[in-house]
Structures are given as structure tokens and as C-alpha cells.
Amino acid sequence: MLNKQIGAISLIAGTAIGVGMLALPMVLAGLGLIPSVLLMLGLWALVYYTVLMSVELNLQAGKGMAIGALGERFSGPIAKWIGTLSLKLLSYTLLAVYIHGSSSIIQKLLAHTIGQEYAFQSIAMLYAFFIAFILLWPIKWLDYINRLLFLGLLAVIAALIVNLGFATSWQHLPLFPPTVSDFSVWHAAIPVILTSFGFQTISHTVVNYCNRDKQTLKRAFFWGSLIPIIVYVIWICTALTALNYHNPEFYQQLIAGNAEIGDVIRELSRTSHWHIIQLLWWWISILAIVTSVIGVGLGLVDALKEQLNSVSNSDSIRKFIAVIITVLPPYLVALIVPNAFLLLLKFAGMILVVIAILLPIYLLHQAKIKNFFYLELRHRGLWLIASVIGAGIVFCELLNIF
């Protein structure tokens, strides 16, 4: 069971530590380090508590079930429709973010290294084929590959943080924003931070993977969510301090929201005079997204494959169709939507509130559970607090949209 726990922790943390590494410096520069860290810690506590709700529902159901199936099990067809639609929309939105972000980074990396800029559409198509190829592999292979990628990701992050630490003066930390933060900075940052812990799409997969062992699941989701918050806090403090020290003008562009993801990676790479370190900045960006792609893509393929039972009796055929349906829509969205990276990431935060906070709380209420697997879920006052915070996050994203 220890092997299962390690695999689950790697899958959860690897899914979370991905696009957040790239997006958080872009949205938190305007808040300063202290407000950013406090905000991230608060949202982590919310995410961990509410994911226990989803796990509780799965355990009560007797097997790992996607949020739509849980909605049907404990409420009815309306909850099933809301859960299924929200989960699919979130997964597709995140995959579109990953395809757009990776393609943009690869495009600028090629321009940086060989001096030739290739068409974004061609790179995105090749990257979509790569995702489909990976998702066709057996889950056992993906498990071990994800562990290797995750360990490699942590090792490279540690190396880059050490490099930044030695290359940066820590006398003038951007602890607070240079001016009073506009409320728009806060309501733009909150959905992105929440999405940075977007492993809820694979909670049902992890439940089945851990054979529904409640203690293994609790430890897996605790450590699987704690590792990302530790990495994010260290990363944000180091990256924002380095950018503020090495290029104050660019830091002001970050605060104003006038920087693209490729620009952030380029400026971070320039903090080192060593060519190998400069390349690591680009490759860690791609690696971070790949670990998220495996987690989110695997959860979506798993959910779609169950819905294709009537199409074919062959598991291989159903998986192939599920992979095509998983990859094609987000690829098209990444091509069509301009500046899709942060725009879609913020939108994903609003959808995540539904499937990670509001719907699980509603289903727990409908289930009328008497014997909880996790005793901390008995306190309904915490349900109310989580509901109010979730509704507030939805309100923040509605402000972003309108």
C-alpha cells in the first residue's frame, strides 16, 4: 500500500504543480509576497478540506465515481448533469490552457535557441498529437512515467531556486505592492490560485487507484496538496524577488498585466549567465505542464471511456475514441481563442468551484450521512464557510468576465 500511496501523491502533486508555476508570478506580482503567501495558504486549506468531501462521497458510494455519477447517486439527474458538464468543461479548459501554454513556450524556445520562429498552429498540432500518444499508454506506464517526471520536476525546481537565490539581492523584497492594490488584482488572482490546485478532476481515479483505503487516500491527498503549496510559496518568493531585482521595469509590466507567459520565462532565464541554466528555465516550463496534462487527461479519458460502453465491447477501441474526444476540442480552442492562457485559467477557477466546493457540499447534505469516514466533515459550520468562500470566488470570476 505504501507503493500505491507514493504513486497517488505523485499523481496528485504532479497534476497540481504545472501551469500554476507559470501563471502565479503573473497574477501575484501586484499583491506582493506577504498577501500572496497568506492567500495561497488559505486557499490550500479550503482545497484540502473540500477534496475530503469528494473522497467521502466516493467511499460512501463504494467506488471511485466522477462528480456527475456522484450527483446521480446522491441527488438525481439535475445534479448529474451539472457535475458532468462542469467536470468536462473544466478538464477541456485546462487542457486548452496546457496546449496553448506549451505551444507558446516551445515557439519562443525555438526562436531563442535556433533563431527561427515556427507557426504556432503547427507546434500546437504536434503537441496535441504528443498528448494523445501519451494518453494511449496503459495507466501503469503513466504512473511510473509521472513519478519520474514529478521527481525530475522537483529536482530542477530546486536547482533553479538555488540559482535564483545566489543571483539575487534579498535586501529589497517586494513584500507588499508599491501602491494600494486595486480590488481587481485580488479578484483576478484568486481563481488562478484555486486552479493551481486543480487535481480534483482525478479524485475518483485516485480513489480507485488506492483501492478505496480511507487512510491511504487521506494521506495521499494531504501530502499531494501540501507539496504543491510548499513549492509554490518558495517559487513565488524567489521568482518575484529575482524579477524585481534584475528587471524592475518588467516587474512593473507584470503588475500592470502586460506580460505574456513566454516573456516571464525569458526574463527568468536571463537572471543566469550560464547557458545550461537558461535552457532549464524553458524546459521546466514544458515539463511542469506535461505532468498536469497526464493527470487531467487521464481523469477525462477515464470518465469518457465509461460513457462509451455502448459503443464497443473492446476496451482498446473505447480508450482510443476517448483519447480523441479528450484532445481534439481543447486543441481547437487553443487555436481559436486569442491570449488563451490566463483568460481560460481564470475561467477554469470558476468551474472548479462548482465541482470541488459547491456540488460536493450539496451532495453531502443530500446524502444525509450518519457514519462519516472522515470525522472532520461532521461540522456543518465549516460547510457553510466553504460555501460562502466558493460563492465569493465565483463572484470574483464574474467580475473578471464582465
Image: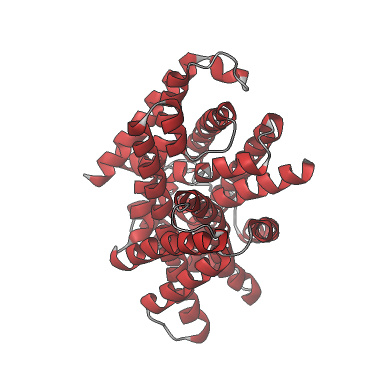
Percent coordinates x, y for residue 172 in the rendering: 53, 48
Residue at 35% over, 37% down? 82
Residue at 51% over, 56% down? 297
Q: Is residue 201 above or below residue 71?
A: below
Placement of the N terminus among the 4 image quadrants: top right
Percent coordinates x, y for residue 5 in the rendering: 72, 42
Is 369 or 219 nearer to us in this picture? 369
Percent coordinates x, y for residue 288 in the rendering: 56, 59
Color encoding of the figure: secondary structure
Is 297 or 155 nearer to us in this picture? 297
Residue at 42% over, 72% down? 124
Q: Is residue 45 above or below residue 285?
A: above
Residue 158 visible in the snapshot: no
Give the total of numbered labels: 0
Q: In the figure, residue 119 lies in which quadrant?
A: bottom left
Residue at 52% over, 71% down? 130
